[in-house]
Each structure stands twice: as C-alpha cells, then as structure tokens.
Image (cartoon, grey):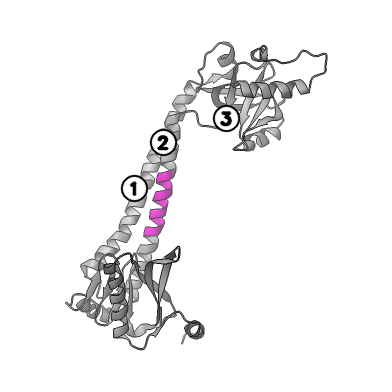
C-alpha cells in the first residue's frame, strides 16, 4: 500500500502528534507540582495550633494556620460586600470565637448536629479589625436584655479574643502558587492532549480515505514547480488539487468544488480578515486561507488563491447569495439522502 512521503505533509502530521506529547508533558508537570502542593500543605499542617492557644498564649502568628473544634455556630452577622463570605459567632463549648466562612462551608455546618458531633475547621489566623468588632458588638448586644452586661470595644477581647479564624483563603502563599500552576498546566495539558488526539485521528483518517493509486499523482503535483505552497496558511494549490494542512489533511480536486464564497470578519465596520469557504461534492463546507488583510501583500495573496481556484474550475458558483444558499441547501439534502440510502 502506497503512503505519502512528502515532507511537508509528514511535518504537519508530526505537529499534530507533538501536541499530544506536549499535553502529556504538561500533565506530568502538573502532577509533580500538585505533589509539591500536598507536601507543602502537610508541612504547614505540622505547625498548626488551636485557635484558643493562639489567642490566649500567642502560640500562633497572624497568617499562621489554626483549627477550631466547633460545637455551635450562629447565623452571619456581617457579609463581605464582594462575595458571599461572611462573619459568624462560634463556640467550642468553652469559649466564643469569630469565624469568616465561605457560604458553602456555613451551609454544610448548619445542617449538622455540632453539639453532639463537633466539627474541626481549619483556617488561618487573622486580626479582627475595629470595623468588624463594632458590627459584632451591635449584633451581640441586640440579643441581650437591658440588664445584661454589654459587649464593648474595651471588653471585646475578653469575649472573643483579638483574632478570628479565616477559612476562605489558603494558608500558604507557596501552596497557593503551586495550586495555580497545577490548574493552569493541567488545563493547558488536557487541551493540547485532546486537540492533538483529535487532529491526529482526523489527519490519519483523511489520509487513509485517499485512493492509494492517487497518492503518487498528488505527490508528483505537490513536487512540481507549478505548485504553490503557502506556508503560513498551510495550503497547497497544485495543478488539479487543493490541499489543506492547517491542523488537518484535506484534499479536494478543483472539480469537486461546487460553491465558493468569501467569509469576512469585521471590526467597527471595517473588514480585518478574509477566508474562503467552499461547498464540495461530499456535502461538506470547508473554510481555509484565513488571511488578515491589513496590507496590500495580504490582499494580493487572498485574491491570488481565489483566482487560482476559480481558473481551475470555472463552473464553481460564486457568492453567498440567496439563490446559492437556497440551491445548495437542496443539494445538501440530496447528498445526505443518497448517503443514507448508500447510493
């Protein structure tokens, strides 16, 4: 069985496979960085203190990691303006504390029997601001009787301490960086992997569809001095064939093209790029030669490709007109019907 040997074709196929390689490499890197994030988090956890110890004995630092065993939780007394994160009162059964929680964390804790089954919450130590203290004081005092001693700025630390537990952010800057890198590398790696697999499968599939007897003819025309190869567009125009290599491998005889029209992209009413769309005998519409037409050379390249194809097949219907749209809609239906009935 004859195979393609043209170096440009093989080079473009290797590029498709290279996407898979890079995708796998980035995924492996993301796994490595994720492992580093886990180890960093474990290291941070080793130095974690109980929140009450941080408040009473100053065994923790602002920004350090701490935990609290929660046996009771109030509703929110202050909500962040930009998020659904909010401040809450909590107790471990002995003392009262202030927590800053994500909404989903609060909803999860709210539906649990904390008094009988306390929950461990991990976060970082933050110093309570004057503004939050004032809001907490107003909320706390609103639930007291007139005779009960009131909470004030002077005695606030005796009730809640000078620190609160922030559960909404990551403890370690290093861990956060690792997590961001892991996310970016994994998303990019998966994207490259899927695109690479898709392109490679399509490339190989389209190569196999070509009649082996026709391969030598196509290659001889590609190697001819009469052939035009547009490197940036990954496009071959030979004597009888249009060959598209922009991440794929598509070969059409000029005689297979039934309809051709320009596809334009505009910016504030001005055309900034043009491509060519063709409708072929297989009932498919293919777009290629996407060119930014910002200068004279680019415009000439586009016109050259257009005219070359048209000169090879003067029977091509031109333009995205109502008549052509209606006509080829019916042609497309006929092609699908014949394919369905195995004509």
Image position of 334 with respect to 128: above or below = below
* Residue position for label 1: 25
How far apart, in angstroms, are the residues tagged by discs 1 and 2? 15 Å
Q: Are marks 1 and 3 in contact (CB under 8 Å)?
A: no
Q: Is residue 11 left or right of residue 60?
A: left
* Residue 22, percent from left and from top: 33, 51
What residue sits right under mark 3 in the picture?
Answer: 167
Name the image quarter holding the N terminus. Answer: bottom left
Mark 1 or mark 3, earlier in chain: 1
The vertical placement of 140 against 291, above or below, is above
Task: Pinpoint residue 249: horizontal percent, then vertical percent.
Answer: 33, 70
- Up/down of 302 relative to 315, above or below: above
Mark linked to residue 35: 2
Q: CA distance from mark 2 to mark 3?
A: 22 Å
Q: Quadrant of residue 109?
A: top right
Q: Position of residue 302 (x, y in %)?
A: 31, 72
Location of residue 234 (image quadrant): bottom left
Within 10 Å of disc 1 (Cα), the crowding (few <14, some 14-19, many 20+) is some
Q: Nearer the viewer, residue 339 or 185?
A: 185
Tell whether 97 sits left or right of 239.
right
Which portion, as a residue range, is magenta? Answer: 184-196
């Amino acid at each position: 069985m004859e195979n393609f040997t043209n170096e440009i074709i093989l080079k473009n196929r290797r590029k498709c496979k290279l996407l898979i390689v890079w995708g796998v490499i980035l995924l492996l890197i993301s796994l490595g960085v994720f492992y580093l994030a886990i180890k960093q988090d474990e290291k941070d956890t080793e130095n974690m203190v109980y929140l009450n110890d941080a408040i009473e004995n100053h065994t923790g630092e602002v920004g350090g990691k701490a935990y609290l065993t929660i046996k009771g939780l109030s509703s929110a007394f202050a909500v962040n303006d930009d998020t659904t994160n909010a401040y809450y009162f909590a107790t471990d059964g002995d003392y009262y504390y202030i927590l800053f929680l994500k909404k989903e964390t609060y909803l999860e804790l709210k539906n649990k029997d904390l008094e009988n089954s306390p929950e461990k919450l991990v976060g970082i130590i933050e110093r309570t601001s004057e503004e939050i203290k004032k809001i907490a004081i107003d909320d706390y005092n609103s639930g007291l009787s007139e005779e009960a001693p009131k909470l004030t700025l002077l005695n606030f630390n005796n009730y809640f301490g000078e620190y609160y537990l922030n559960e909404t952010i990551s403890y370690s800057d290093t861990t956060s960086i690792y997590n961001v890198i892991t996310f970016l590398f994994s998303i990019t790696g998966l994207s490259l992997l899927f695109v690479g697999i898709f392109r490679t499968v399509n490339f190989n599939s389209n190569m196999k569809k070509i009649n082996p007897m026709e391969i030598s003819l196509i290659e001889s025309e590609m190697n001819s001095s009469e052939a035009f190869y547009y490197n940036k567009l990954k496009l071959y125009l030979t004597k009888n064939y249009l060959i598209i290599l922009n991440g794929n491998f598509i070969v059409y005889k000029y005689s297979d093209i039934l309809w051709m029209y320009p596809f334009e992209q505009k910016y504030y009413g001005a055309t900034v790029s043009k491509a060519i769309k063709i409708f072929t005998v297989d009932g498919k519409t293919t777009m290629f030669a996407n060119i930014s037409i910002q200068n004279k050379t680019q415009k000439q390249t586009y016109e050259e490709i257009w005219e070359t194809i048209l000169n090879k097949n003067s029977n091509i219907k031109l333009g995205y007109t109502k008549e052509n749209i209606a006509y080829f809609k019916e042609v497309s239906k006929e092609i699908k019907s014949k394919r369905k009935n195995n004509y």
